Image (cartoon, coloured by chain):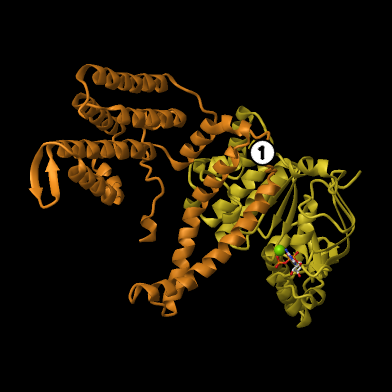
Chain colours: A yellow, B orange
Amino acid sequence: MRPLIDIEHVTFSYPQENGQGIEVLHDITLQIPAGEFVAVLGHNGSGKSTIAKHMNAILLPMGGKVYFSGLDTAEEENLLPIRRQIGMVFQNPDNQIVSTIVEEDVAFALENLGIAPEKIRERVDEALRAVDMYHYRLHAPHQLSGGQKQRIAIAGVLAMHPRCIVLDEPTAMLDPKGRQEVMRVLHELHRQYHTTVVLITHFMEEAVQAERVVVMDDGKILLDDTPRAVFVQIDRLKAVGLDVPQVTELAAVLRAAGVNIPAALLTEDECVAALTAALEETDGNHTHA
Amino acid sequence: MLKDITIGQYFPGTSVIHRLDPRMKIVLTIVYVVLLFLVENLAGFVLSVVFVLAAYLIARIPVKMIAKSIKPILPILLFTMLLNLFFVRGTVIWQWGVLEITREGVRLSVLMVIRILCLIAGTSLLTYTTSPMTLTDGIERLLKPLGKVHFPVHELAMMMTIALRFIPTLVEETEKIMAAQKARGADMETGSLIHRAKALVPILIPLFLSAFRRAEELALAMECRCYHGGKGRTRMKQMHLAPRDLWALLLTAAALAAVIVCNIFFGSLYG
Ligand SMILES: Nc1ncnc2c1ncn2[C@@H]1O[C@H](COP(=O)(O)OP(=O)(O)OP(=O)(O)O)[C@@H](O)[C@H]1O
Ligand SMILES: [Mg+2]
């Protein structure tokens, strides 16, 4: 079966005033099947946002092809059919909310698509409930916290019933509580509606929760695997300016010091379990001796 | 200080007037303005004052709000009053050199002031009882027929909506920038006018840069959400005329008719 997002040998450079721009994507090939939860990592300027904008035809590839659910993004008539199936959420919640009333903002995309008013009402309420913001439907956006605003932005794309949501550092401007709220909503969507999620992030803790991690470096894909397989490559990640989750780093340090625990530890719970096991083992050895 | 800036001065409420269809409220306001310009005699003036005061009472807007909305136009008010007072010919009741006040002048200037006060009170009631967003929607739908002659109705409404949306955000940002500049020792409240104007530059530049960045990001976000202009766009909220809208129209029309009848039967104060 065809992947939902099919990026084939894409190269891209931003047009510059002096004619030729510098290439920021070099021959990228990436396939994302429907229903997957993918995290994209990479240091600043590695091309994450640029590749995301190729997925819904905001940018068009200079070389290669991008297909969304089989539709070529370069075809003008595919523009709306693609954009109604793929929701985009950006970093700054303030700059993506259009209306002065929460529920009207959530309705924005549906109004653009010319959907019947009663149907819009239904979907708006449903989307607001899905992100747990129904109570705030009549508020003004500036009365909300960052995490709440970002959930409204998510509701705004959810109302379209998209097959895929692409989020470009949605939690970068939020406090820890807001970050948790947003991540909870994303996982809920993924589980309940099997929505495909592409999450661009700088937070390793968020990437760990994904099913697949893609690491970008200077316009190329460096690693593309499960979180576990990606994060054990501590040296490679550090070489491209990325961190690894704190527990993974701790595990590596402990292993280097001779403690017998697995290298691929991703969460605190796993780490605690592994350390307890290791301690019990050494205890056992002592009693034997 | 900056937080005090409100746009449109909306007083949320649930009175009948608040709940009227915004399109009807705009039309009624226009009818009332027409009525004011038709008034020619005392009965008509009494009627227009009573009409607007009754509307304030029904809407439960404190009448002292009228005073607040008049403040900015006080100089214009005074000017028209003096103009009428000194330049209308008639029976002289007071004279000083070339300056003379006539009975007719006094009467006309008083009537002029009443007329302007009613005008301000009537139009302010519209913004007191209608949220800016609802007002924008109402205007958009009223002007819709103009779209046929390529008047950019949807675009104007969209611009107003976005302006309303971003004013609080930009005000907040201005405060942050001002606080940051003050923390670095910028002095914005004392000194000559030129000095203070100069102190504004380090506030305006970052503000404009950020506004441009916001505009760019917002345009991108709108495009991602399938925005492609007003063509084929529907609205979630539909406006329906309720019986109360028709009653309000009837009442206002009756007032207008009464003014015309008064003009016919009681003659004109303007001689
Ligand atoms: N509008 C633009 N015009 C010109 N060059 C751009 C533009 N946007 C991005 N670039 C350049 O393209 C490269 C990739 O940028 P991109 O925004 O995709 O990186 P990113 O991985 O999203 O970085 P970040 O983590 O900072 O968001 C960078 O070198 C950047 O300077
Ligand atoms: Mg980016």
Q: Horizontal and vertical percent for residue A59?
A: 78, 55
Q: Horizontal and vertical percent for residue A128?
A: 58, 41
Residue A40 in sight here: no
Name the residue located 41 percent from the left edge and 19 percent from the top edge: B246
Name the residue located 65 percent from the left edge and 48 percent from the top edge: B222
Q: Horizontal and vertical percent for residue A235?
A: 80, 77
Three-letter code, disc 1:
Asn
Which image quadrant for residue A158? top right
| Placement of A228 over or under B84, stated as above or below | below
Q: At numbered mark 1, what does the secondary structure look like: helix, strand or loop?
A: helix
What residue is shown with label 1?
A: A112
- Asked if disc 1 is less than 8 Å from ligand 1, the answer is no
Quarter of the image with the C terminus of chain B in it: top left
Q: Horizontal and vertical percent for residue B72?
A: 30, 51
Horizontally, residue B189 falls left or right of residue B100, namely: right
Name the residue located 78 percent from the left edge and 65 percent from the top edge: A47
Residue B211 in sight here: yes
| Placement of B132 over or under A38, stated as above or below | above
Horizontally, residue B130 falls left or right of residue A280, namely: left
The total of numbered circles placed on residues is: 1
- Image mark 1: chain: A
Q: Which of the two residues, B95 or A124, is positioned nearer the viewer here?
A: B95
Q: Which of the two residues, A27 or B206, is positioned nearer the viewer here?
A: B206
Quarter of the image with the N terminus of chain B in it: bottom left
Name the residue located 34 percent from the left edge and 72 percent from the top edge: B189
